[in-house]
């Protein structure tokens, strides 16, 4: 058989590609369905993304940031900011719901791993990354 004949169904330009979340590895003989594995992911909601992307847009307009990446995991959601796409992230904006009652669910981590700010309110945490005007002394 040739590779073209081995294909189950031809691809169509009209039909959208359906992306399915990865199915978690079976634990103790129990398999998880795609619906249950999607429910355990930590994500940013629309309000949080609006705040983060607002800051990102201002920094891109200022020429400081150029690229970003979003990662949704089981324990945390991460918005990484890059100066160039080939580098390590400058900052990681993290959401960890398990820390919500202690230090706060939101945090800013620098490229060196230093936690710059952690708190319960995303706007106050993001204020660390806002540009401040400084008085120039001669």
Image (cartoon, rainbow, N blue to C red):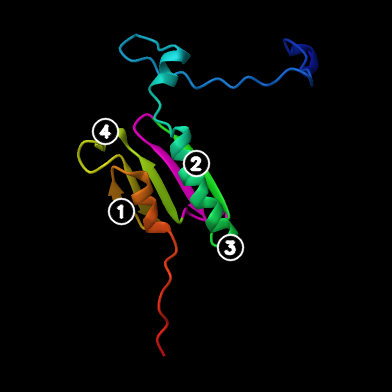
Binning the other alpha carbons within 10 Å of mark 2 as few (below 14), some (14 to 19) or many (20 upward) gives: few
Res 81 label: none
Circles 2 and 1: CB atoms closer than 8 Å? no
91 relative to 3, above or below: below
Q: Kindly state the secondary structure of the residue where label 2 is placed.
A: helix
Quadrant of image for the N terminus: top right
Seen at 32% across and 44% down, the residue is: 121
Circles 3 and 2: CB atoms closer than 8 Å? no
Quadrant of image for the C terminus: bottom left
Q: Kindly state the secondary structure of the residue where label 1 is placed.
A: strand
Residue 3 is situated, as x and y percent measured from the top left of the image, at: 77, 18
Q: Is residue 45 left or right of residue 64?
A: left
**Which residue, given by chain and number where applicable, does mark 4 sit on?**
98
Residue 49 is situated, as x and y percent measured from the top left of the image, at: 48, 39
Is 70 a magenta residue?
Answer: no
**Which residue, given by chain and number where applicable, does mark 3 sit on?**
63
User: Which residue extends farthest left?
Assistant: 102
Circles 4 and 1: CB atoms closer than 8 Å? no
Residue nearest the viewer, comparing 9 with 127: 127
3 vs 1, front mark: 3
**Which residue, given by chain and number where applicable, does mark 1 sit on?**
115
Question: Which callout, 3 or 1, points at the residue further toward the start of the chain?
Answer: 3
Question: Which callout, 4 or 1, points at the residue further toward the start of the chain?
Answer: 4
Residue 83 makes an appearance in the image: no
50 relative to 109, above or below: above
Q: Which residues are magenta?
A: 74-89
Seen at 55% across and 20% down, the residue is: 20
**Which residue, given by chain and number where applicable, does mark 2 sit on?**
50
Question: Which callout, 3 or 2, points at the residue further toward the start of the chain?
Answer: 2
Binning the other alpha carbons within 10 Å of mark 3 as few (below 14), some (14 to 19) or many (20 upward) gives: few
């Amino acid at each position: 058989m040739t590779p073209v004949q081995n294909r189950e169904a031809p691809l169509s330009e009209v039909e959208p590609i359906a992306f399915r979340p990865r199915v978690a590895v079976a634990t103790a003989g129990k398999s998880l369905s795609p619906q249950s594995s999607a429910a355990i992911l930590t994500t940013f909601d629309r309000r949080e993304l609006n705040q983060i992307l607002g800051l990102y847009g201002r920094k891109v307009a200022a020429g400081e940031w150029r690229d970003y990446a979003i990662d949704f995991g089981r324990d945390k959601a991460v918005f990484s900011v890059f100066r160039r796409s080939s580098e390590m992230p400058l900052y990681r904006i993290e959401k960890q719901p398990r820390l919500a009652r202690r230090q706060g669910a939101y945090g800013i981590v620098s490229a060196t791993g230093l936690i710059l700010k952690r708190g319960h309110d995303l706007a106050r945490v993001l204020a660390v990354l806002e540009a401040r005007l400084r008085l120039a002394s001669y």
